[in-house]
Image (spheres, coloured by chain):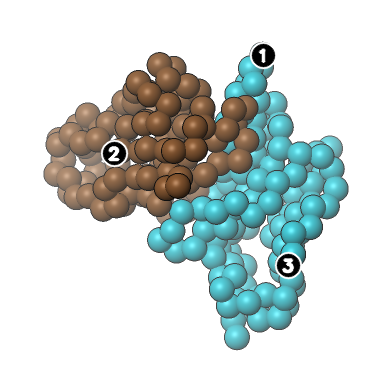
Chain colours: A cyan, B brown
Amino acid sequence: GQNIDQPTEMTATEGAIVQINCTYQTSGFNGLFWYQQHAGEAPTFLSYNVLDGLEEKGRFSSFLSRSKGYSYLLLKELQMKDSASYLCAVRVLDRGSTLGRLYFGRGTQLTVWP
Amino acid sequence: NAGVTQTPKFQVLKTGQSMTLQCAQDMNHEYMSWYRQDPGMGLRLIHYSVGAGITDQGEVPNGYNVSRSTTEDFPLRLLSAAPSQTSVYFCATQPRGGGLAFFGQGTRLTVV
């Protein structure tokens, strides 16, 4: 089976930096996604890592270490609109297949205070 | 370009009733899937399809059926609704190889 762990809740203040961690234990690992989900809405794509290292997209960065089964999402210059759930998802390739299924963590609810 | 369209957005069913949740996409993606999202449980895969005529089970398939007769449509059928199926359901599409997933807006289902 797939095991993906992330903290349930985090809080931070406007303008601060927050790091949301995700650890995973999977077979057939083929990439890690971060999604943002506001209450009552669908998840939307934030970032993707398939190789080790840091990917930066504006205020958001994501890091991956495949040997440690570890990723984090870094949010800088926090804004009130960043209050949302952040989902870590691992892409898994079935043996002998090009099919890649996504397995999601339970999400981290981030609250940004003024 | 609508992307992924789910209908209905809200539905209330009585225990034992059947219904179909619709999902349509216009992105020509091969891979389509259904997830349910429950509080504290994250997104769990119900069924998925890698192309027309091909479907398979995910993590929590019991009580649900799917079919894929066209690339565009992937309906999810609840055969006999149970209160345990109260959830928010998301349809998602992915391009060939199962990369980035695009989600529909969700269907909030309540079974009483």
Q: Are marks 1 and 3 on the same chain?
A: yes
- 1 and 3 marks in contact (CB < 8 Å): no
Mark 1: secondary structure: loop
Give percent across and percent down for residue A2: 61, 33
Give percent across and percent down for residue A101: 58, 31
Where is mark 3, residue-wise?
Answer: A59
Residue A6, visible in the rendered structure = no
Q: Inspect the image, locate mark 1, and give the three-letter code of the amino acid beneath it.
A: Gly
Cα–Cα gap, marks 1 and 2: 32 Å
User: Residue at 52% of width from left, 58% of height from top?
Assistant: A37
User: Residue at 29% of width from left, 45% of height from top?
Assistant: B7
**Which chain's residue wears label 2?**
B
Between circles 1 and 3, the one closer to the viewer is 3
Where is mark 1, residue-wise?
Answer: A96
* Neighbourhood count class around disc 2 (C-alpha, 10 Å): few under 14, some 14–19, many 20 upward: many
Q: From the viewer's perspective, is B31 left or right of B66?
A: right
Q: Quadrant of residue A30?
A: top right
Vertical position of residue B75 compared to residue B2: above or below: above
* Depth order, front residue of A50/A27: A50
Vertical position of residue B35 compared to residue B71: above or below: below
Q: Earlier in the sequence, mark 1 or mark 3?
A: 3
Q: Inspect the image, locate mark 3, and give the three-letter code of the amino acid beneath it.
A: Arg
Where is mark 2, residue-wise?
Answer: B21
Cα–Cα gap, marks 2 and 3: 37 Å
